[in-house]
Image: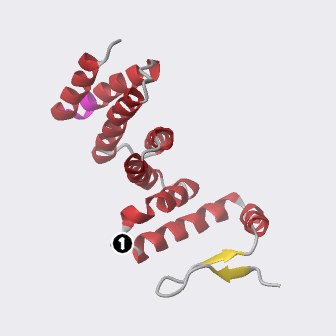
Amino acid sequence: AQILVSVTLSPDIEYDFTHAVLREVAHDSLPRPRRAEAHRRVFSTIETYHSDRLQDHAESLAYHAVEGQLWDQAALYQGLATERALVRGPYTEAIGGIRSALEAYERSSRSVEATQRAIDHLLRLRRVLSATGEISEEAHRAVNRAGLLAEGIGDRVRLGCGWDGRCAAPW
């Protein structure tokens, strides 16, 4: 009996397990450090092989970055996956993606670039929550956090966007 089958044709040949249980058993049988390393290798392979189409693979890259504990990359690609979700329209998926990107940021190196992306995610979260009619405490916290982060890195443009979000919200 086959364990792996080809699921696509050339030029991008991909393989998958014949059954989800086989995939799960193989994945779960690896020790956590080895599993994380495997995800890092898959992440690197996707990033290298599809370097001209990274946006198209944002969801897979985000997943493998999280599982491989590559927090800076996880935040980056989760943000790209969120943008794709917003284009498709399911706001609940986008909200979940933004939250995941922010969780990854909290575990990242918190570089200036990563902080700028986190601020953008926080402001986007407020807008998406507003679009769903859910002006909530979470939206208020997101705008406040964006302002604090912008102040922390001296980003006056993003600080202004944060203040704009505070002023526009019916708190």
Main SS class of the magenta portion in the image: helix
Residue 166 picture location, percent across and down? 28, 19
Question: Toward the viewer: 142 or 71?
Answer: 142
Relative placement, left or right, of 143 versus 25 is left
Residue shown at the point (45%, 18%) measured from the top left: 137
Please determine whether, in this image, residue 136 is positioned above or below residue 43.
above
Please identify the residue farthest to the bottom as the structure is shown.
10
Left or right: 152 in relation to 5 = left
Residue named by callout 1:
51
Residue 29 vs residue 78, the one in the foreground: 78
Q: Magenta segment, which residues?
A: 150-155
For label 1, the SS is loop
Q: Is residue 154 magenta?
A: yes
Query: Given the current orientation, which residue lies at the most extreme top position?
Result: 171
Q: Is residue 11 above or below residue 27?
A: below
Graded by Cα atoms within 10 Å as few (under 14), some (14 to 19) or many (20 or more), the crowding at tag 1 reads few
Locate the C terminus by quadrant.
top left
Residue at coordinates 76% horizontally, 80% vertically from top-left?
A: 3
In which quarter of the view is residue 136 placed?
top left
Residue 41 is one of the magenta-drawn residues: no
Q: Quadrant of the N terminus?
A: bottom right
Q: Position of residue 138 (x, y in %)?
A: 45, 23
Comparing 124 with 88, the one in front is 88
Work out whether residue 12 or residue 49 is closer to the camera in this orientation and state it. Answer: 12
Q: Position of residue 120 (x, y in %)?
A: 31, 39
Amino acid type shown at disc 1: Ser
Q: Is residue 85 above or below residue 158?
A: below
How many numbered discs sit on the rendered protein?
1
The x, y position of residue 6, in whole percent, is 63, 83
